[in-house]
Image (spheres, rainbow, N blue to C red):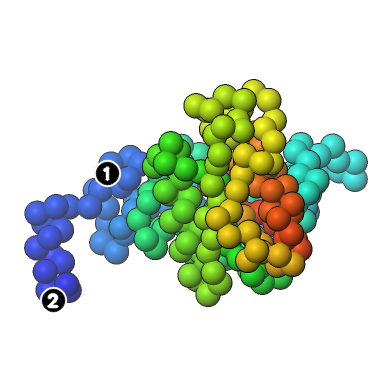
Amino acid sequence: MKKLLSPFIDALFPPFCRWCHHRLDPGLTLLCKNCLDYLFLLEPNNRCPSCFQQLENSSHRCYRRYSCIKGVAFCFEDSLALRSLFNSAQKPHPLSSFFLLQWQQLRWPMPDYILATPGDWFSGKKWKSRQSLAHSFAHLLQQPYLPLYIDRFHLPKPLLSLEKQPKRPLSEAIYLKDPSKIVNKRVLIIDSITESGQALSLAAKALLNYGALEVRALGGVCSGF
């Protein structure tokens, strides 16, 4: 039935590119062919395992140090077209398969739990999108998903996101509803757009304090690249 009605639905409500708003060619559902060029995965080889910056010379000054995270990696170069896709809260998330391909390239061990960088109702659409992305990725790996939350009473500026806090908040600002699940378990944090890196660092520290065996992080883009 869906196949029969699809031509009529497309005629009445033609699909348009989410970024440039041009009409999509047949077979495309999110971005046009030009905007799809932004969706190429970063090559993990010759990159710093601590900040994922390209290693050009033997001497490397780490751009960001995530001392409590076993490994950090990102999927894409930063772009405005790509950022628009990270606002999607649909399930499955349109970028979850790209995260899976990047995870396979990294050859990391299978995580016991998948988590999104923390958020709450105050985070609005961005957190829902990260939840959808992490949940969809967990479904592809066939591993359980756990949500991380923010206790805003422990934030220096309760109205700001974790990435924009002027001072580093305490790890007590991040909590799990059932922390016993991750004791002696490998966990993987999924992030969308990493700016200061505070959300990843605080989440990893909180998870280790809860008893996690190992924490790794896979993000969409890092705005510092």
Most foreground residue, 88 or 179: 179
Mark 2 residue type: Met
Query: Which mark is drawn over residue 11?
Result: none
Q: Quadrant of residue 121?
A: top left
Image quarter (top left, top right, bottom left or bottom right) of the C terminus: top right
Q: Position of residue 91 (x, y in %)?
A: 37, 61
Q: Residue at x 65, y 47 (%)?
A: 203
Categorize mark 1 by other alpha carbons within 10 Å: few (<14), some (14-19), many (20+): few
Describe residue 132's horizontal placement relative to residue 163 as left or right: left
| Residue 76 visible somewhere in the drawing | no
Q: Nearer the viewer, residue 34 or 104?
A: 104
Residue underneath mark 1: 22
Q: In this rendering, is residue 170 above or below 209? A: above
Q: Can residue 61 be seen here?
A: yes
- Position of 7 with respect to 128 (left or right) is left
**How far across and down, in percent of the image, does residue 6 sit?**
15, 66
In the foreground, 156 or 51 = 156
141 relative position to 33: left or right: right
Within 10 Å of disc 2 (Cα), the crowding (few <14, some 14-19, many 20+) is few
Residue 216 position by quadrant: bottom right
- The type of residue carrying mark 1 is His
Describe residue 41's horizontal placement relative to residue 88 as left or right.
Answer: right
How far across and how far down the image is residue 58, in percent?
A: 90, 45
Q: State the CA–CA distance, disc 2 to disc 1.
A: 27 Å
| Up-down relation of residue 74 to residue 225 (above or below) | below
Q: Quadrant of residue 208?
A: bottom right
Q: Earlier in the sequence, mark 2 or mark 1?
A: 2
